[in-house]
Amino acid sequence: MPELRRDTIIGRWVIIAKERGNRPYDFVIEKDKTRGGFCPLCPGNEHTTPPEVLAYGRPDYSPNGPGWTLRVVPNKFPALVIEGDLDKRGEGIYDKMNGIGAHEVIIDTPKHDETIPMMSHGQLIQTFWAYRDRMVDLAQDSRFRYIIIFKNFGRAAGASLEHSHSQLIALPIVPHRIQEEIQSSLHYYEFKERCIFCDIIRQEKSQDIRIVCENNDFITICPFAPRSPFEMWLMPKRHQSSYISMDDNQFHSLTDLFLETMQRLDKALPGVPYNYMLHTSPLRIPFLEHYHWHIEILPKVTTMAGFEWGTGFYINPTPPEESAQFLREINLD
Amino acid sequence: MNKYKILVVDDEESIHLLYKEELEEEGYEVHSAMSGEDALKAFDAQEPDLVILDINMPGMDGIEVLRQMKQKKPRVPVILSSAYPEYKQDLASWASDDYIVKSFNLDDLKSSVRRNLAK
């Protein structure tokens, strides 16, 4: 019989269609055809991007040329613009403001075909450093309230360029999805005086059926009510509400566990398109007792249709306990 | 003085008629291609100074054409022209020199053509 499960943080319901019990080999992953040709993100083509705002791996005196190991550039055709005032105003009962924001692209690697599971620790950690460095810089702009960082991998997940990149959007508002998470966590905290994410980690450790992998500082689980097969959340074990509060050791630990997590996913579902999103506390709020930053990884193996859009429910054919077991048992040697 | 050659790539006949009339008035020599495949042939044969390229076309789409054109001749400016602003979020469009949302008022397109030819 199918099972309705409720996400304990935001109360979202999912239907776990247990009887279908799709195993990884039941999912047909259509591999993207490599398109080849000109790539605007490759070294040597720096002139096709706006001037960089951050680069690692080459001296500062030669910006916007090759030799970099990671590069961050503003979006060439941004949906939101950086210049101007918000000019918040109303139109009757409706609210609006100018489309102010920052939209940047983090070019994770100079190698066109290098995906995250193929990266070295030394390469991947730069991506995590870049997230922090750009957040710290953009937080100085008082117009911005929130920075969302995400990655689309594969055409089905919204990425048309195979060259590995992630994106950052600084927004003048805290998105509803984040507000919902923070408010629900606060509600739980007011009731129990504990962080709900810390409690999830405690329960997952004691049940030990949805853990994918862990190290001293981080844990990856398949959440109790996942939106898609093989959805994973990576969280710091120690309570921490802001991504930028991480120390050097944590960056290394995060890189190790994220790499392992993505390698497990890639072995389970080779080349699967996915999105990941970094959820952290709003800007200039360094510590919240009730909130816990984390990364949500969503493989794109199911489709959202009328039922999902109309209800906010998700139908997931693979129980997270099975996903976690499969991912955990993968041999990475 | 030699006229600048512009290749207009679009699967809509009406767009060709509109662009040809307006761009010829500006003194440009205008060539047409109705598909991605034809565009790549015309790109080699006509050696245009600038390309105006639609994205949504049957067969080879504009993004694929763009990548191949830039692979062959990166210095030839290519302006993407689409009815859909959301393709701007497609990072593959970054290989282009400009992105203009289609409109019957061609002022933005014409000023982009002038700007890119002056580079």
Image (cartoon, coloured by chain):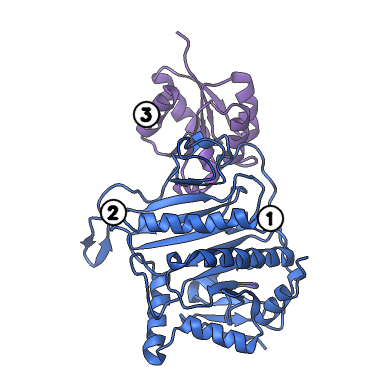
Chain colours: A blue, B purple
Q: Examine the rendering and report whether any part of residue A301 can be seen.
A: no
For marks 1 and 2 on the same chain, the one whose residue lies earlier in the sequence:
2
Locate residue B58, reporting x and y percent: 62, 42
Foreground mark, 3 or 1? 1
SS state under label 1: helix
Quarter of the image that includes the N terminus of chain A: bottom right
Name the subunit of mark 2: A
Residue under the point 61% across and 24% down: B42
Q: Which mark is residue A325?
A: none
- Residue topped by disc 2: A98
Locate residue B93, reporting x and y percent: 52, 41
SS state under label 2: loop
For residue A222, above or below residue A263: below
Question: What distance separates the C-alpha of mark 2 from that of mark 3?
Answer: 25 Å
Label 2 packing within 10 angstroms: few (<14), some (14-19), many (20+): some
For residue B38, above or below residue A139: above
- Residue topped by disc 1: A118
Label 1 amino acid?
Answer: Met
Q: Quadrant of residue A68?
A: top right
Foreground mark, 1 or 2? 1
Label 2 amino acid?
Answer: Asn
Residue A131 or residue A180, whichever sits in front: A131
